[in-house]
Image (cartoon, rainbow, N blue to C red):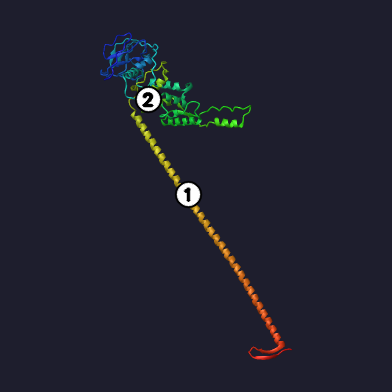
C-alpha cells in the first residue's frame, strides 16, 4: 500500500477539505516547495495541459497554476518560480492551483523572499539498492517537483539539469576556464564516488609527488577514455616546472653536485599534444551518456556530487540548488533502447574491427614468420652451397696439388731415369772404349810379338811378329 502523508498547513488559506489532498503553498516561503501528497488510489483526470512559459506538457501528478487575470494561461511549478513574468503575464496576478484535476482551495500571491536556511544533510553514499524507507520516500516525493524530469523527450538535459551541470563544471574548473584539466576531472570523479578500482587514474597521486611518467600515463589513459565515447575535448602539451638550480658548495659548483642534481631532478620528457582537456560540452555528453546507458548510476553520481559540494548555486536564479537527494524517478526508469542498441552495434563493430585487426596482425605475423623461414632456408641453402663450393674447391685444390706432386715425382723419376740411362750409356761407352783399347793393345802386342791367330774364317794362322 502506498505511503500516506499528513496534510501540511498552509499560510493565509484554510485547510483542504478533501481527506486525500494536502497542499503546501506559503507566501513567505519559496513556492518551489509547492507539491501535493495524495493517496495514489485517487482517480486521476485525463485532461492534459501545456505550460505557456516553457511549452512543456505539465504532468498530471505535478501542480498546475492557472492565472485568473490572463486568458487561458497555465504555468508549471518550475516556471512559476524561475519565470514568474512574461510578456502576457505578470507575477502580481492571482492564480488558482490544480492538482490531479482537482482545484485546491488556496488564495495566495507569488512572492520571492529568501529561502529559510535548511538543516545540513549528513553525507552518505547512495547505492542502487531497491529498498527504501518511509523517510526516503518522503524525501523523494518532496524533491521530485523541484527537479522534475531531468531528461526531456528529445534526449536532452532539462533546463535545471543543464544549470546543475554548469554549476558542477564551474566548481571544478580552475579560474573559470572552459576546460577541465586531468587532475580537476579526477577530483570530480572522486566527488562522484568513483574509486581507483573502477577508475584507474585515481591511483595516481594528484600532488607534487607524482612523477612525469605517471602524469603522462594519466594523460594517455584519459585521452583514450575521452575518445571511446567520444567526448568533446582538445589536446595540448603538458608543461613541467623547471628543476631548482644547483646549489654551490663554498662558492663553487662541484662536478659531483651536478651529477647528484641530475639524478634527483631528471629532465621531464615532453609529449606533444598529450594533455587532454575536457570541455563543458564533453562533460555534458558524458552525463547524458550515463543517463541513456545507466540512469541508476547517474542518479548515484549526481547525489554524491550534491552531497560533496553542497551548496551549489544555480547560476540563473542565484539560489542554491535543493540539497535533498535527486529522486530516482526524475531520471529514465531504464536505459534507452536505441542508445543501447547503438552502443551494442558500436561494440560489435569495434569487436569486429578488433578481430579484423587481430586477424591482420596474425596474418602479418604469419607472413613475417614465413618470410623469416624462407630467409633462413635461403640462408641455409646459400650456406650449404658455399660449403659445397668450398669443399669442391678444396677437392680441386687437393687434386691439383696431388697432380702437381705426381708430375713432380714423374719429373723426378724421368730425370733420375734419364740420368741413369746417361750414366749407363756412359758406362757402356767406357766399356766399349776400354774394349777397343784392349783389342787394339792386344792386336798391337800380337803384331809385335806374333803368334797363332784365328782369322775371320776361323782358321788358325801363324803370324810372325815384328820383333
* Disc 2/disc 1 C-alpha distance (Å): 59 Å
Residue 333 coordinates in the image, percent (x, y): 32, 25
Question: Dot 1: what SS?
Answer: helix
Question: What mark, if any, has residue 15 been given in the picture?
Answer: none
Q: Quadrant of residue 113?
A: top left
Question: Dot 2: what SS?
Answer: helix
Q: Nearer the viewer, residue 141 or 212?
A: 212
* Residue 438 visible from this viewpoint: yes
Q: How many marks can you see?
A: 2
Query: In the current view of this chain or complex, which residue is farthest to the right?
Result: 467
User: Which residue is drawn at the image coordinates 38% and 34% (left, top)?
Assistant: 347
Q: Quadrant of residue 104?
A: top left
Quadrant for the N terminus in the image = top left
Q: Nearer the viewer, residue 324 or 16?
A: 324
User: Which residue is drawn at the image coordinates 38% and 26% (left, top)?
Assistant: 288
Quadrant for the C terminus in the image = bottom right
Residue 244 coordinates in the image, percent (x, y): 57, 27
Q: Nearer the viewer, residue 229 or 22?
A: 22
| 334 versus 390 height, above or below | above
Q: Residues within 10 Å of mark 1 (few under 14, many from 20)?
A: few
Q: Is residue 438 left or right of residue 363?
A: right
Residue under label 1, please give it: 376
Residue under label 2, please give it: 298
| 119 versus 467 height, above or below | above
Residue 349 coordinates in the image, percent (x, y): 38, 35
Q: Could you tell which of marks 2 and 1 lies nearer the N-terminus? A: 2
Q: Are marks 2 and 1 in contact (CB under 8 Å)?
A: no
Q: Residues within 10 Å of mark 2 (few under 14, many from 20)?
A: many
Amino acid at each position: 500500500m502506498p505511503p500516506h502523508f499528513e496534510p501540511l498547513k498552509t499560510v493565509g488559506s484554510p485547510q483542504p477539505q478533501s481527506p486525500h489532498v494536502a497542499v503546501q503553498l506559503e507566501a513567505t516561503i519559496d513556492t518551489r516547495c509547492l507539491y501535493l501528497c495524495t493517496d495514489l488510489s485517487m482517480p486521476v483526470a485525463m485532461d492534459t495541459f501545456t505550460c505557456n512559459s516553457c511549452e512543456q506538457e505539465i504532468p498530471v501528478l505535478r501542480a498546475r497554476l492557472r492565472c485568473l487575470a490572463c486568458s487561458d494561461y497555465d504555468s508549471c511549478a518550475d516556471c512559476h518560480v524561475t519565470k514568474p513574468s512574461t510578456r502576457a503575464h505578470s507575477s502580481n496576478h492571482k492564480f488558482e492551483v490544480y492538482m490531479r484535476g482537482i482545484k485546491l482551495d488556496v488564495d495566495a500571491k507569488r512572492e520571492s523572499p529568501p529561502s529559510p536556511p535548511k538543516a545540513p544533510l549528513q553525507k552518505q553514499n547512495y547505492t542502487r539498492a531497491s529498498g527504501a524507507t518511509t523517510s526516503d520516500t518522503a524525501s523523494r516525493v518532496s524533491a521530485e517537483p523541484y527537479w522534475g524530469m531531468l531528461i526531456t523527450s528529445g534526449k536532452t538535459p532539462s533546463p535545471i539539469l543543464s544549470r546543475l551541470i554548469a554549476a558542477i563544471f564551474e566548481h571544478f574548473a580552475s579560474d573559470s576556464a572552459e576546460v577541465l584539466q586531468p587532475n580537476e576531472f579526477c577530483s570530480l570523479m572522486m566527488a562522484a564516488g568513483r574509486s581507483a578500482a573502477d577508475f584507474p587514474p585515481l591511483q595516481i597521486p594528484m600532488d607534487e609527488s607524482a612523477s612525469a611518467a605517471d602524469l603522462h600515463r594519466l594523460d594517455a589513459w584519459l585521452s583514450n577514455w575521452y575518445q571511446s565515447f567520444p567526448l568533446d575535448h582538445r589536446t595540448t602539451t603538458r608543461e613541467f616546472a623547471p628543476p631548482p638550480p644547483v646549489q654551490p658548495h663554498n662558492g663553487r659548483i662541484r662536478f659531483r653536485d651536478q651529477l647528484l642534481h641530475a639524478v634527483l631532478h631528471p629532465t621531464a620528457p615532453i609529449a606533444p599534444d598529450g594533455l587532454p582537456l575536457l570541455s563543458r560540452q564533453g562533460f555534458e555528453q558524458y552525463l547524458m551518456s550515463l543517463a541513456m546507458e545507466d540512469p541508476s548510476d547517474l542518479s548515484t553520481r549526481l547525489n554524491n556530487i550534491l552531497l560533496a559540494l553542497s551548496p551549489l548555486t544555480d547560476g540563473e536564479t542565484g539560489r542554491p540548488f535543493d540539497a535533498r537527494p535527486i529522486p530516482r524517478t526524475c531520471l529514465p526508469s531504464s536505459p534507452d533502447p536505441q542508445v543501447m542498441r547503438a552502443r551494442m552495434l558500436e561494440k560489435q563493430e569495434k569487436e569486429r574491427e578488433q578481430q579484423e585487426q587481430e586477424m591482420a596482425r596474425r596474418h602479418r605475423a604469419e607472413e613475417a614468420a614465413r618470410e623469416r623461414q624462407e630467409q633462413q632456408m635461403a640462408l641455409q641453402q646459400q650456406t650449404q652451397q658455399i660449403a659445397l663450393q668450398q669443399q669442391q674447391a678444396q677437392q680441386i685444390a687437393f687434386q691439383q696439388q696431388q697432380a702437381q706432386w705426381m708430375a713432380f715425382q714423374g719429373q723426378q723419376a724421368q730425370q733420375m731415369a734419364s740420368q741413369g740411362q746417361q750414366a749407363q750409356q756412359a758406362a757402356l761407352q767406357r766399356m766399349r772404349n776400354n774394349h777397343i783399347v784392349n783389342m787394339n793393345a792386344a792386336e798391337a802386342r800380337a803384331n809385335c810379338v806374333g803368334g797363332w791367330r784365328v782369322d775371320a774364317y776361323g782358321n788358325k794362322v801363324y803370324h810372325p811378329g815384328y820383333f
